Image: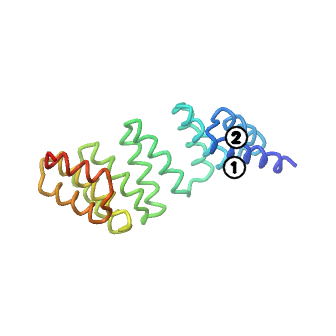
Amino acid sequence: MDADVARDHFDRGYAALTAGDFYEAIDCFTRAIDLKPNVAAGYRYRAFARLGRNDRPAALKDFAEAIRLKPDDPQLRLERALEFYKQRGYDAAAADCDAALGLDPGRADGLGLRGRCFAALGESDKALADFAAALAVDPDQAHTYRVFRGVLYMELGRTAEAKAEAEAALLSDPEYGAAKHLLANLTGV
């Protein structure tokens, strides 16, 4: 009975979350958690609702609890890593990426995010290595990882390499705005 009621609260919370009603979503997920406190999904989606309300500390606590309940889920770690990254907690974000990649080494999104963390921390060689690895794992997102590399090259003053990355990104996706912007910054056009 509690499981059915918890599922109903969870489903209502998910519907509220997707509709952008974050207060209702938090309330529903909390009710589901109260009935089934050992289910990671309730904490995960409540974290997203809390992020929608800009309650980042509470969201990070929910991500931590979801990870405690489901430690072998690399996606949870990457979701928390992204939030740490947004808050400029680059060391914490990189650590979560390391943990996620330890569970699933072929995650291009984890490699790309960790590369962005390394770039922010001034560890350019590590960042470039992660961007190259992400590109090798997920060539369908070549434009994204090439722009990440291009921006880093630009910041390092390696403009020829930055321009080559922007041009290669545009070959992959001619309408990719970030690549157009990077190229415009490099060429002044």
Q: What residue type is labelled 2?
A: Phe
Q: Using a 10 Å C-alpha cutoff, classify the residue at mark 1 as few (fewer than 14 neighbours), some (14 to 19) or many (20 or more).
A: some
Residue that numbered label 2 is attached to: 29
x%, y% of residue 25?
67, 38
Q: Write down the quadrant of residue 140 in the picture.
A: bottom left
Q: Which colour scheme is used?
A: rainbow
Image-based side of 46 in relation to 164, left or right: right
Q: Which label is found at residue 112?
A: none
- In the depicted view, which residue is nearer to us: 181 or 107? 181
In the displayed structure, 48 sits above or below 142; it is above
Q: Where is residue 28 in the image (x, y as percent from the top left)?
A: 73, 38
What residue is shown at x 41% (from left), y 45% (from top)? 93
- Reading the chain from its start, which is encountered first: label 1 or label 2? 2
Badge 1 amino acid: Val
Q: Position of residue 147 (x, y in %)?
A: 27, 54
Task: Please tell me whether mark 1 sits on a helix, a strand or a loop.
Answer: loop
Identity of the residue drawn at 44% across and 45% down: 82
Label 2 Cα crowd, 10 Å radius (few <14 / some 14-19 / many 20+): many
Q: Looking at the image, which is closer to me, 89 or 180?
A: 180
Residue holding disc 1: 39
Residue 92 visible to the viewer:
yes
Residue 70 screen position, x and y as percent: 60, 53
Q: In this view, does 151 lie to the left or right of 114?
A: left
Q: Is mark 2 on a helix, strand or loop?
A: helix
